[in-house]
């Protein structure tokens, strides 16, 4: 049983107004309560039999010891090395699936080339490292992942988190070699962290990141991403990377903006938007690769009109090393590892949450099963192995995963094909990126962050739940002001604090019997419900623990002995008045969890 339940999961009370089975449990009261002669002692004994835990503290201890023991026991029994793709290929692979996977892999590879170059710049890395992140990690995930459609590789939000983690340690402009090494060490640590989570089956800790926290975080991240790419779009350097100082410097130095760079980047956004609309309407089966098309057109226009020369002076990508990624172990030191610890946890959890969300969405849509723990293994292996070949931390990409599904990808063979496309580009085509304007890559990033913005959820939270909106706002503001690492920590901390505060003053409902039935309902919501004479039935919509025991005690004293203690705010105003008018013989308490001292 769960926390506060007995070993058979019995509560002896009501949990929800819409569950008729629980209401039937109150049939013991009947219409003639005098003949029942139910006393407080009888109720205490009945609940004591139903609750095996002597105290809430003992229940918590037993739950924790059992859960931790199960995790430790799973270390020796966990079969972490599985190869789902090989099993599927061996058992049910056909030529038609191969054709679909090749088409999907090539299509995604064409999309990944410009995305990889753009996201590497977002991570403050040379563009070539975006292609490295789109090659070896895909091979590792293809063999270990359980999702048929997941497309891993560089992602905007992870790229931003990488930059904000490593830049305070080594400046990417002043110490580029040390910065790159630190990023690769971070990727290795992220891989080890995720593999450790898989072995200990700790994927459950992501439940602390509520939807409100993640929504506020991602919306704030969209602002941080756009701010970081502003220097490439307008062709000028900013002395500070924070949001407000960046835009203040832009407004006060408008004369320094490279107008040509700004116009070309803006036209790039318009072109991406237009081609995307065209794909949605006319090219659903085989979409036009809008990002690759933009790269080709912008490069050709730059060379033809000499935009990289005076007086235009547009900044270019420049030399991109040619050749396949080589094996190299990053230089690791104790100080570097200690400095990257907090960032490792943030990047690891973000990568897993983003990826597992997409895995479950597409698995549900196409009706196949996935293994959450195996996904941790696959992501951890992708990041760990990738770090040895120049790849920075990777995660699932929503746009590329959706493209795989749209063009008919069947298995992770498409990931092998995509990695093959990137490796071919690395071997033969890197010299073609020399004249690629950086403002065009920035426009690709600006279009990508559109998927991170969702203000409708904030409006819905404001309408439905003010405390959840407060969590959203705290996560949003802390991330904008302090960055991804600290913002995530503050968001989670505020969410936990709100949860504890809400649990400390739970909703208390007074129940009455519906005429002509054995059902009991909240009299605030069902005016026709009538209380049983001489009996007060309270339903407490929370587990009883140390945070709310004083409040619940006040509720009971107010119900049984009016005038003692502070009167709680029941969900029924008429009932509060009734409590002050007469003294009840006893109260029947209904709660989600009960435990009595021995």
Image: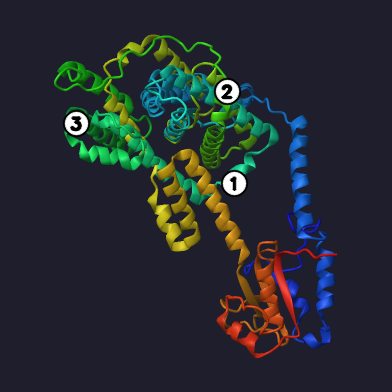
Observer-nearest of 178 and 73: 178
C-alpha span from label 1 to label 3 = 47 Å
C-alpha span from label 3 to label 2 = 42 Å
Whole-percent x, y for residue 183 in the image: 49, 24
Question: Residue tagged by mark 3?
Answer: 256
Q: Is residue 439 left or right of residue 108?
A: left
Secondary structure found at label 3: helix
Whole-percent x, y for residue 243 in the image: 34, 41
Upstream in sequence: badge 1 or badge 3: 1
Q: Which mark is residue 384?
A: 2
Upstream in sequence: badge 3 or badge 2: 3
Up the image or down, 237 lies above or below 299; here it is below
Quarter of the image where one finds residue 513: bottom right
Up the image or down, 93 lies above or below 468; here it is above
Observer-nearest of 25 and 168: 168
Question: Residue tagged by mark 1?
Answer: 207
Observer-nearest of 56 and 411: 56
Classify 10 Å Cα crowding around label 3: few (below 14), some (14-19), many (20 and above).
few
Whole-percent x, y for residue 314 in the image: 22, 23
- The quarter of the image holding the N terminus is bottom right
Classify 10 Å Cα crowding around label 1: few (below 14), some (14-19), many (20 and above).
few
Observer-nearest of 36 and 274: 36
Secondary structure found at label 2: helix
Q: Is residue 362 left or right of residue 66?
A: left
Task: Tell me if residue 172 can be seen.
Answer: yes
Classify 10 Å Cα crowding around label 2: few (below 14), some (14-19), many (20 and above).
many
Q: Are marks 3 and 2 in contact (CB under 8 Å)?
A: no
C-alpha span from label 2 to label 1 = 24 Å
Residue at the far front in the pictured view? 335
Q: Residue at x 76, y 50 (%)?
A: 63
Whole-percent x, y for residue 477 in the image: 42, 49
């Amino acid at each position: 049983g769960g926390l506060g339940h007995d070993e058979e999961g019995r509560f002896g009370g009501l949990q929800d107004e819409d569950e008729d089975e629980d209401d039937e449990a109150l049939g013991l009261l009947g219409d003639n309560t005098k003949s029942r002669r139910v006393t407080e002692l009888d109720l205490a004994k009945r609940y004591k039999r139903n609750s095996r835990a002597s105290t809430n503290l003992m229940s918590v201890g037993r739950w924790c010891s059992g859960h931790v023991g199960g995790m430790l026991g799973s270390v020796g029994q966990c079969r972490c090395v599985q190869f789902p793709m090989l099993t599927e290929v061996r058992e049910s692979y056909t030529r038609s699936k191969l054709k679909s996977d090749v088409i999907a892999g090539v299509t995604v590879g064409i999309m990944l080339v410009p995305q990889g170059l753009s996201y590497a710049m977002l991570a403050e890395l040379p563009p070539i490292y975006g292609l490295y992140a789109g090659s070896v990690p895909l091979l590792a995930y293809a063999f270990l992942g359980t999702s048929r459609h997941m497309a891993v590789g560089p992602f905007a939000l992870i790229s931003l988190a990488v930059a904000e983690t490593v830049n305070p340690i080594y400046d990417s402009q002043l110490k580029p070699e040390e910065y790159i090494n630190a990023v690769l060490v971070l990727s290795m640590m992220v891989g080890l962290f995720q593999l450790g989570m898989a072995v200990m089956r700790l994927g459950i800790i992501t439940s602390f990141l509520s939807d409100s926290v993640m929504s506020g975080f991602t919306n704030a991240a969209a602002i941080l991403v756009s701010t970081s790419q502003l220097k490439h779009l307008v062709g000028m350097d900013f002395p500070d990377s924070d949001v407000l100082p960046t835009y203040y410097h832009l407004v006060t130095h408008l004369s320094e903006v490279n107008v040509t760079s700004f116009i070309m980047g803006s036209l790039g956004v318009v072109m991406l938007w237009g081609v995307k609309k065209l794909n949605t309407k006319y090219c659903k089966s085989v979409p036009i690769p809008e990002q690759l098309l933009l790269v080709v057109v912008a490069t050709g226009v730059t060379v033809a009109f000499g935009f990289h020369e005076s007086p235009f002076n547009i900044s270019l990508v420049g030399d991109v090393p040619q050749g396949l990624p080589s094996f190299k172990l990053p230089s690791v030191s104790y100080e570097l590892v200690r400095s990257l610890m907090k960032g490792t946890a943030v990047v690891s959890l973000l990568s897993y949450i983003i990826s597992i969300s997409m895995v479950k969405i597409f698995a549900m849509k196409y009706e196949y099963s996935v293994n959450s723990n195996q996904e941790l293994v696959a992501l951890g292996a992708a990041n760990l192995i990738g770090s040895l070949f120049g790849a920075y931390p990777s995660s699932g990409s929503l746009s590329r995963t959706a493209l795989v599904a749209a063009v008919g990808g069947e298995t992770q063979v498409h990931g092998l094909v995509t990695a093959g496309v990137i490796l071919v580009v690395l071997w033969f085509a890197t010299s073609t990126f020399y004249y690629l304007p950086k403002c065009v890559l920035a426009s690709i990033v600006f279009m990508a962050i559109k998927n991170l913005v969702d203000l409708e959820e904030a409006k819905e939270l404001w309408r439905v739940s003010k405390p959840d909106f407060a969590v959203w706002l705290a996560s949003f503001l802390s991330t904008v002001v302090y960055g991804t690492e600290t913002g995530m920590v503050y968001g989670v901390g505020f969410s936990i604090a709100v949860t504890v505060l809400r649990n400390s003053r739970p909703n208390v409902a007074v129940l009455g019997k519906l005429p002509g039935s054995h059902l009991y309902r909240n009299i605030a919501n069902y005016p026709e419900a009538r209380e049983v004479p001489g009996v007060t039935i309270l339903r407490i919509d929370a587990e009883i623990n140390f945070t709310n025991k004083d409040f619940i005690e006040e509720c009971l004293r107010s119900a049984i002995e009016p005038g003692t203690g502070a009167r709680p705010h029941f969900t029924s105003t008429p009932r509060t008045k009734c409590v002050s008018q007469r003294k009840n013989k006893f109260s029947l308490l209904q709660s989600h969890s009960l435990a009595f001292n021995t």
